[in-house]
Amino acid sequence: MRHAIAVTVVLLGVAGVFAVPAAGATDAPTRGTNATDDQPTIVAAYPNPVADGDAGEFVTLSVPDERSLSAYTFGDDETTATLPNVTATGRVVLTDNATAVPDAVEGRVVEVRGFPALANGGEPLTLETENRTLDTLTYAAAPTDELTDGEAWRPLSGTDRDPVGGGPTTVEAFVLPDAPDAAVDAIRGAEERLLLAGYTFASERAADALVAAEERGAAVEVLLDGGPVGGFTNRSVAVLDRLVDNGVTVSMLAGPTAPYRFHHPKYAVADDRAVVLTENWKPAGVGGHSSRGWGITTTQPEVVEGLVRTFRADATNRSTVPWERHRADITVENTTPVSGRYPSRFDAARLDADRVELLVAPDNAVGRIESLLANASDSIRILQVSVDGPENRLLRAAIAAARRGVDVDLLLSRAWYAAEENRALAANLTATAEQSGVPLSVRLADPNGRYEKIHAKGLVVDGEHVVLGSLNWNDNAFQNNREVVLLVSGEAVGAYYGRVFAADWEGGARRLQLGLVVVLLVVVAVAAAVGRKIQFRP
């Protein structure tokens, strides 16, 4: 048996840039253990609104089937209220002031006489029936304008959606830098709408497509992050100014009340077609001048409209400002765009897919990917820039799969900003894999002239499920960033990206350097002496 986990990890920024502490670092809320699937449960609480007097406080229940709410009471540690005789199912929003509940809140709003005033400093909330506790949610200090689901806090102005998708369908699969025309081709020709979302934007070719669509009469909008790490480049500023001068609406999601720490997705919708990428809209990314990236173009209706809904929710957020106004407050860095040239080993391909599913963070992406890893039966191939440690939620799921005998390969970047941390993680995981006898392999990528660095965020499970998008494997991306991911299932798609992964894996087959070997031996020695610091838990 080979002691290796095949995981390919590709990050898309400076290592550690997006691995920052969660916003609003308050004590985490907790859930009770009495909840059952056949009874209503407490799924959200909003204790600290922006409005005066905390008007608009609410608690959301999930009611599994249609029933009268009058059989239930809701209370805190001071007050208990009987719910009204209202028949409801699904998400039900309980409040004392229905008109004050924000419009973005999903669910049927029900006013409750005597509804408890939710304490900003924290308290337990309880749902009961006939003196029997059905569910509890306990929270400590509540951040302003944030919602808790019993596990973490998130800004209310963010979305809270389930995955959407469907199939069978066909998709166009491509990788960068091999197929630099594919991403821009996906947005050319839009006649009615062209919505582009990204972290940064500096692509002249993409700008040409946006301006041309505007001139044809399409509604063209761009939404970017208002505070990218390192500021804005002179090239980006010039391109964004050009877009605005030609009638394109350019907006920035920015400021202390923004629902996400970073607006980090990379996607576009052109009429009824959408493209989702791992790469930024700039020469190093979609231009094909630097990074290894993955992308998918799809016309699957639920996915396309799901992206439109995501764009609309983010673009109309109260923290979104026009580029013209935001421009006066930015930091501009003078840079020279990359101009590398690389061979095209993998052409874009039109492929059959059984299903295409849209995932977004922080709403649902991590849980869905974790479930996919938990059900892997044969192989896991992970491509990431880096992973923020052995306790990473998705890495632990991959390691658990390896313990079941699933062959796991993890491919990490050798770029200067990630190399040191990646070598340390590789040494730790390799030592533990050897001692535990699990099929786990970790390598740092060797581009060997085929690309400059790994920036993709990709995953192939059992050769038929492909995950790609903007999601880096760190807690900040999981919990605080807006991220967009596609899960595409089908043997043809799995085989395409499996071949790309295999080529990059073999390209990175350079053996551990002497320094890493020394580190590895030290790790093994320490583990033998005092017990393994990193363990593969049962």
Image (cartoon, rainbow, N blue to C red):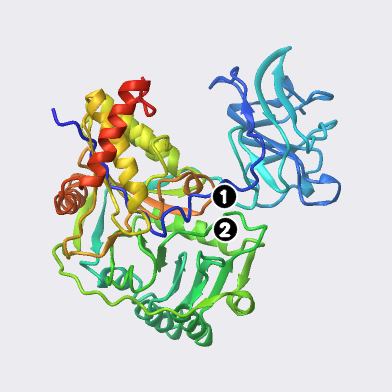
Q: Amino acid at mark 1?
A: Thr
- Residue under the image location 38 percent in, 75 percent down: 190
- Where is mark 2, residue-wise? 313
Earlier in the chain: of badge 2 and badge 1, it is 1
Q: Is residue 226 visible?
A: yes
Marker disc for residue 388: none
Question: Could you say where residue 277 lies in the image, as x and y percent from the top left?
Answer: 35, 60
Q: How many marks?
A: 2
Between 3 and 113, the residue placed more toward the observer is 3
Report helix, strand or loop for mark 2.
helix
Q: Residues within 10 Å of mark 2 (few under 14, many from 20)?
A: some
Residue at left 41%, top 51%?
A: 471
Judge by depth and name the residue closer to the eye, 271 or 23: 23
Vertical order, 351 against 535 (above or below): below
- Residue 278 % position (x, y): 35, 58
Q: Looking at the figure, which quarter contains the N terminus?
A: top left
Toward which corner of the image does residue 317 lie, by quadrant? bottom right
Give the residue at mark 1: 159
Q: Could you tell me how far apart the alpha carbons at marks 2 and 1 are, in whole angstroms? A: 7 Å
- Residue 223 is situated, as x and y percent measured from the top left of the image, at 52, 68
Q: Are marks 2 and 1 in contact (CB under 8 Å)?
A: yes
Residue 349: x and y in percent read 18, 61
Is residue 375 at least partly visible in the picture?
Answer: no
Left or right side of 418 for 64: right
